[in-house]
Amino acid sequence: MVNAYILIQTEVGKAASVAAEIANIPGVTSSEDVTGPYDVIVRAEAENVDELGQLVVAKVQNVNGITRTLTCPVVHL
């Protein structure tokens, strides 16, 4: 299982609607709008890195109002 945080920048005024829409995507375990350099932080899980990439590119990045994403896989050191 691969877990990751996806940091999202949105168009002005779109953070709440983006967070709500992403929360309904299978594989997303949490989605919250925040303040700071990013507007939404998502926690997601997938079976492997390829599935994680498909989740981000095919589903998350297609949500209307997103301008940029940064995916940060969780590592266990």
Image (cartoon, rainbow, N blue to C red):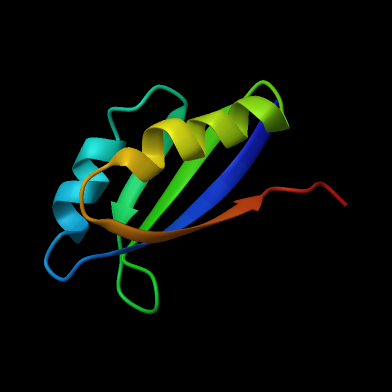
Relative side of 41 to 46, left or right: left
Q: Residue furthest bottom?
A: 36
In the displayed structure, 70 sits above or below 59; it is below
Relative side of 26 to 51, left or right: left
Q: Residue furthest right?
A: 77
Percent across and percent down for residue 16 are 16, 54
Q: Residue at x 22, y 49 (%)?
A: 18
Count of numbered tags: 0
The N terminus - image quarter:
top right
Relative side of 76 to 66, left or right: right
Q: Residue at x 44, y 32 (%)?
A: 58
Percent across and percent down for residue 51 are 62, 25
Percent across and percent down for residue 15 are 21, 59
Identify the image quadrant of residue 9. bottom left
Q: Nearer the viewer, residue 63 or 77?
A: 63
Q: Residue at x 71, y 32 (%)?
A: 49
Percent across and percent down for residue 48 are 71, 25
Q: Nearer the viewer, residue 55 or 34?
A: 55
Q: Residue furthest left?
A: 13
Q: Residue at x 69, y 48 (%)?
A: 74
Q: Nearer the viewer, residue 45 or 8?
A: 8
Relative side of 35 to 11, left or right: right
